[in-house]
Amino acid sequence: MNILLAVDGSAYTKKMLAYLATHEELLSGNHQYTVLTVQAPLPARARSALGKDVVDNYHAEEAEKVLAPVCKFLGRHGIEAKRSVKVGAVGESIAKVADSGKFDLLVMGSHGHGALATLVMGSVTTQVLAHSKVPVLLVR
């Protein structure tokens, strides 16, 4: 299987990794893995004030803070994962990568907000489910 792991460095990412570690059928050298993190873009005024190089370096550093521990975890399990970093609307970006990358499964942690919080704030999980054609495994 070609599996996409969407991560954000939160406690929910850690729960997702713990779940994978207890399920050999999902965490195996027989599968291919890509670890994706999506960074929300900085406001336009900040981007223009800071300049492209500074903004690009910022996003690269923030992505590395998220990806490094996940890739280290996978490495301890004998798995070499590809890394992917995107900047944009988080839910839509995850769904787009999942669909365009020919993935068999998308695995992500879910914050599990209630219905009211989802209605008011939106939800990355809701956006991914609405936009992706790839099966999604949510870990709460």
Image (cartoon, grey):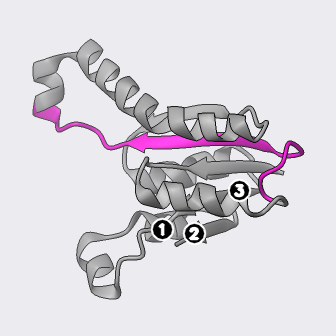
Residue in front for this viewpoint, 38 or 28: 28
Q: Amino acid at mark 3?
A: Ala
Residue in front for this viewpoint, 134 or 140: 140
Indicate whether residue 100 is drawn in magenta: no
Disc 2 target residue: 139
| 88 sits left or right of 77 in the view | left
Q: Secondary structure at mark 2?
A: strand
Disc 3 target residue: 21
Residue for point 58% across, 60% down: 16
Please tell me how crowded label 3 is: few (under 14), some (14-19), or many (20+) other residues with Cα within 10 Å: some
Q: Are marks 1 and 2 in contact (CB under 8 Å)?
A: yes
Separation of residues labelled 1 and 3 (CA atoms)? 17 Å
Disc 1 target residue: 110
Precedes in sequence: disc 3 or disc 2: 3
Please tell me how crowded label 2 is: few (under 14), some (14-19), or many (20+) other residues with Cα within 10 Å: some
Is 56 drawn above or below residue 136 in the view shown?
above
Residue 31 percent coordinates (x, y): 84, 46
Task: Write down the region rendered in magenta.
Answer: 26-45
Q: Secondary structure at mark 3?
A: helix
